[in-house]
Image: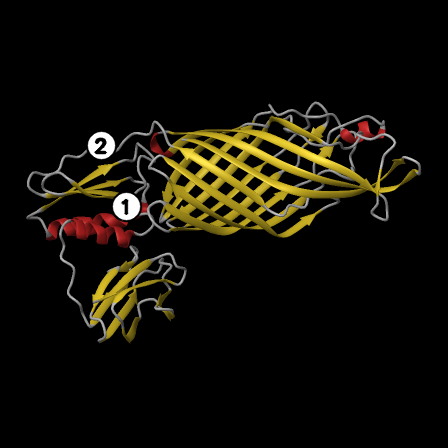
Amino acid sequence: MLRLDTLGTYVHATHPDTDDVVGRGTIDITHDQRIFLEESRLSIALGLPRGFGLSLVVPVRVFSTTIRYEDASGAVVQLANPGIHHRDETLVGLGDPILLGSITRTIGAWRVTARAGASLPLGRTQSNPFVLGDEGLAHEHFQMGTGTIEPVAALEVSRAWLRAYAFTQQASYEDSYGYRAGDRYAAGVELRRALDRAWSVTGGLALQDETAEHWRDTPDPSEGNLGRVDVMIDAGASWAASRDVSFDLDVKVPIYTHVVGGQLDMPAIVSLGASWSFGRPTAPKIEHAEGKTTIVDYWATWCAPCKVLEPRLEALARDHADHVELRRVDLTDVDSALELPHVTVYDPSGATVLDRSAEGDLASLYGAIEAAIGEAPPPPATHVEIHVTDLGFEPSNVVVPAGVPVEIVITRDSEASCATSVVIAGTRYALPLHERVTIHTTFARGAIAYACGMNMLHGTITAE
């Protein structure tokens, strides 16, 4: 997979100083600096058999700044020797690429990916700016890289609509200028909701922490990166233009920031991304069974939802053995060939009547399979039984008569499901485990969507 991300932020930084001002001598002043930071990252990821992978991330960094100097009253002043500490300028350069190896495994219902590797010291570094400043020489505080090889590790766990991650990059020694970057940490939790087959949205919280940088010849600097912690709200959207191409937008807004000394104040971090999956194997074409509807189930040993869907498909094929054939394709050794579980249904003539992934909603996929094989929908009923299983709401689509009192009984059978409550027509009903919750109501003609309390699992009640 090839991916390009561009993230940027506009920041405003100030810090006090004492300097020689034109016509006023040496006075206390404030450096008022406005900075635009942008980083573009080109990522190449290669999937290998048995859940292994390799990836390379190559960053290009842009640092653009303007500076003005103010006295104690806020008036702009002119330095006798301008441009020593800061200047209006734009710097562009390669950052430190990161090379990573990964392994993915399924533990229970969770998909776990661990990554480890190192950054490569290819980004440009600068001499000690504090020493040069004390000598009255022009200097740069911005570093394109760290000048050292730094170990990197990351962990990601996910299931259906939930993802959590952690990342660290450790600085273990000084570069040739006596500079050692701060250690970096990041963690977050993210909820994902598919709006349809192309669009999805995400939301969550992100934590970023960076320890203080160090200079051998300046053990206690008064400025620069002296350590910071940011907690941010994270929101984004993604659009799949095709099976292989997708685009996304992500915005992080700080809700808590703790810094040491005078540091950058970031109002938001905006990221734009595009990805292209290439060279991945195509799922093998399965010929339909002659004269029968054929269900092709693509699965893998690491795919927990596949294991939930499998017995349901086997039972469905048994119940319709006279006109339905089930065939299963193991994609364990061709990771990411499809978003799993994925099902294709061919009619008796060989035409494709269904080709879709679960997209986090197994119950909806199973209902689509039933419809594709010609399973007749039930007639309108005044008594409806709905169960919350590992698949979701079952059935996920029910039909009731319009304008007639109906009784809906919902039972949560799954302890792992997020559907601990359900919202129907704006009213929330708690769903205690293994307890029957009875709802008496009357529906006007039309379709009424309902969902779990977290708005992740969905169903539809159609009144006709």
Q: Can residue 263 be seen in this view?
A: no
Quadrant containing the C terminus in the rendered view: bottom left
Count numbered badges in the picture.
Answer: 2
* Amino acid at circle 2: Pro
Q: Is residue 178 visible?
A: yes
- Label ID, residue 418: none
* Residue 247, image x, y percentages: 43, 39
Q: What element carries label 2?
A: loop
Q: Which residue is drawn at 45% across and 38% down?
A: 114
| Residue 342 sits above or below residue 449 on the image | above
- In depth, the one of 272 and 141 nearer the eye is 272
Q: Residue at x 67, y 25 (%)?
A: 125
- Label ID, residue 284: 2
- The answer to the question of whether label 2 and label 1 lie on touching residues, with beta carbons closer than 8 A, is no
- In depth, the one of 341 and 69 nearer the eye is 69
Quadrant containing the N terminus in the rendered view: top left
Graded by Cα atoms within 10 Å as few (under 14), some (14 to 19) or many (20 or more), the crowding at tag 1 reads some
Point out the tag, 2 or 1, that comes first from the N-terminus: 2
* Residue 73, image x, y percentages: 86, 49
Q: Quick check: 379 left or right of 202?
A: left
* Residue 354, image x, y percentages: 21, 44
| Image color mode | secondary structure
Residue 356 falls in image quadrant: top left
Q: Quick check: 183 left or right of 319?
A: right
Alpha carbon separation for disc pair 2 and 1: 18 Å
* Amino acid at circle 1: Cys
- In depth, the one of 125 and 449 nearer the eye is 449
| Residue 421 sits above or below residue 284 on the image | below
Judging by the rendered image, the residue that carries numbered circle 1 is 306
Q: Residue at x 66, y 42 (%)?
A: 11
Graded by Cα atoms within 10 Å as few (under 14), some (14 to 19) or many (20 or more), the crowding at tag 2 reads few
